[in-house]
Image (tube, rainbow, N blue to C red):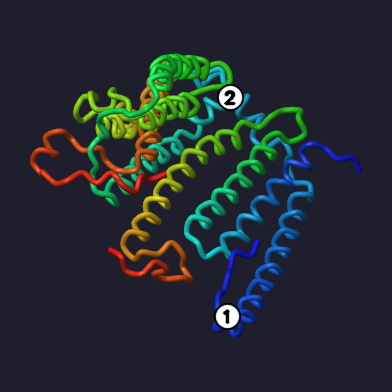
């Protein structure tokens, strides 16, 4: 576990210091793991947790899947804040790096690029299926968003021409869309006389499905953008700035 | 005492958490710190899912939903941390909190 490597003569004095520190941290970690294991092995007050309450209220939630009901109805606050976290993450990542032009002239293997051309529609289809399945079984916005994000990562890795022909503003607006739609639903419920994020029972199913579709789209875009690492430059920006593109230092 | 899957998964989650914490403390490299935090997070997720599974009679969906939310949040956090680490590397030319300016100032 010790990754500390000292070199040269100045190490000898510091080595004792560092070994003392690492010994101390080992003792602390051992104590922490013992405490955690004790807490885990001690039986808790209610091993079933909230399962009964979720089941009792499932008929009012608008969906049949219990995880989806928790995510988008009972604890929709969590999902709203999660959309906000994604939005904030994209904002931070984009503001830390200067915008970079989308790479042109794909030098990838033609087999690979045609495979990606086959795979991406399939992935979009699977994402759509997961989204649809989410209302009654395992699946939902997050899984669909992850698949869409993976499709985006494939497109980035093969520097597909689809990226440079993307409509202007799709990225920024698409990433904001999930958060804004969620906020609109939440505030709309207040405007209609309910509580924040409270759905009418009659319209709960439609609201949840709409939220899931929009959230999956935004999550997928955000994940792909995280992989891309910096904001892709708009064509107009490129001609205006006129600076040489710097393609080195691809971010993981 | 028979070894149940809950027991094994829960203790594995705790172990991963502690290993990640140890790595976070002892590794000075920024990238390793980010990886260590990810290992910690994986331990927490495994533990939460195990708690939700309980004894397999009725599965509690609340921890599962929390894990789903947490995965996305941890991915965002990792992306921000990586972007910050890249920025630190570009600005100070260091990737390590102990060894500053390992390569001579070539920028």
Instruction: Please give the label number shown on residue B23.
Output: none
Chain under disc 2: A
Q: Position of residue A212 (x, y in %)?
A: 42, 23
x then y, percent, for residue A112: 42, 22
Q: Earlier in the sequence, mark 1 or mark 2?
A: 1
Q: Chain of mark 1?
A: A
Q: Quadrant of the C terminus of chain A?
A: top left
Picture coordinates of residue B20 (x, y %)?
61, 55
Tell which residue pokes out farthest to the right in this image.
B1
- Residue reaching furthest bottom? A13
Q: Residue at x 69, y 40 (%)?
A: B51
- Position of residue A43 relative to residue B60, above or below, is below
Q: Mark 2: which secondary structure?
A: helix
Residue at x-position 76% and y-position 38%? B6
Residue A203 seen = no
Q: Secondary structure at mark 1?
A: helix
Residue drawn at x 52%, y 25% is A68
User: Against A122, is B25 above or below?
Assistant: below
Q: Which residue is mark 1?
A: A11
Whether residue A177 is visible: yes
Quadrant of the image containing the N terminus of chain A: bottom right
**Mark 2 Cα-neighbour bin, 10 Å: few <14, some 14–19, many ≥20:** many
Q: Circle 2 sits on which residue? A: A66
Q: Horizontally, is B97 left or right of B42 in the view?
A: left
The answer to which of A40 and A52 lies nearer the viewer is A40
Q: Is residue A122 left or right of residue A221?
A: right
Q: CA distance from mark 1 to mark 2?
A: 57 Å
Q: Nearer the viewer, mark 1 or mark 2?
A: 1
- Residue beneath the point at 54% across and 22% down: A139
Q: Residues within 10 Å of mark 1 (few under 14, many from 20)?
A: few
Vertical comparison of B22 with B63: above or below = below
User: Would residue A163 appear left or right of B7 to someone viewing this image?
Assistant: left
């Amino acid at each position: 576990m010790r990754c500390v490597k000292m070199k040269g003569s100045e190490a000898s004095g510091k080595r004792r210091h560092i070994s003392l520190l690492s010994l101390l941290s080992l003792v602390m970690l051992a104590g922490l793991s013992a405490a955690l294991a004790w807490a885990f092995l001690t039986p808790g007050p209610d091993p079933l947790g909230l399962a009964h309450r979720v089941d009792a209220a499932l008929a009012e939630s608008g969906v049949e899947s219990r995880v989806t009901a928790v995510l988008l109805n009972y604890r929709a606050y969590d999902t709203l804040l999660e959309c906000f976290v994604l939005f904030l993450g994209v904002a931070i990542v984009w503001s830390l790096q200067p915008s970079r032009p989308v790479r042109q002239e794909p030098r990838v293997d033609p087999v690979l690029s045609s495979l990606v051309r086959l795979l991406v529609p399939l992935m979009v289809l699977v994402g759509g299926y997961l989204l649809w399945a989410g209302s009654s079984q395992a699946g939902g916005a997050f899984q669909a968003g992850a698949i869409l994000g993976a499709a985006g990562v494939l497109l980035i890795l093969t520097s597909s021409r689809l990226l440079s022909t993307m409509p202007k503003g799709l990225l920024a607006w698409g990433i904001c869309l999930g958060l804004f739609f969620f906020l609109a639903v939440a505030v709309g419920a207040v405007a209609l006389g309910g509580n924040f994020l409270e759905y009418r029972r009659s319209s709960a199913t439609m609201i949840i499905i709409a939220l899931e579709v929009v959230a999956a789209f935004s999550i997928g875009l955000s994940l792909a953008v995280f992989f891309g690492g910096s904001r892709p430059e708009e064509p107009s920006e490129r001609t205006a700035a006129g600076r040489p593109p710097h393609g080195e230092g691809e971010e993981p | 005492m028979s070894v149940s899957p809950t027991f094994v998964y829960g203790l594995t989650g705790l172990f991963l958490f502690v290993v990640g914490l140890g790595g976070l403390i002892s590794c000075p490299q920024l990238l390793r710190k980010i990886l260590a935090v990810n290992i910690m997070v994986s331990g927490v997720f495994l533990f939460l899912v195990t708690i939700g599974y309980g004894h397999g009679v009725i599965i509690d969906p609340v921890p599962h939903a929390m894990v789903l939310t947490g995965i996305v949040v941890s991915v965002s956090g990792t992306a921000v941390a990586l972007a910050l680490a890249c920025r630190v590397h570009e600005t100070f030319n260091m990737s390590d909190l102990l060894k500053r300016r390992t390569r001579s100032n070539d920028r």
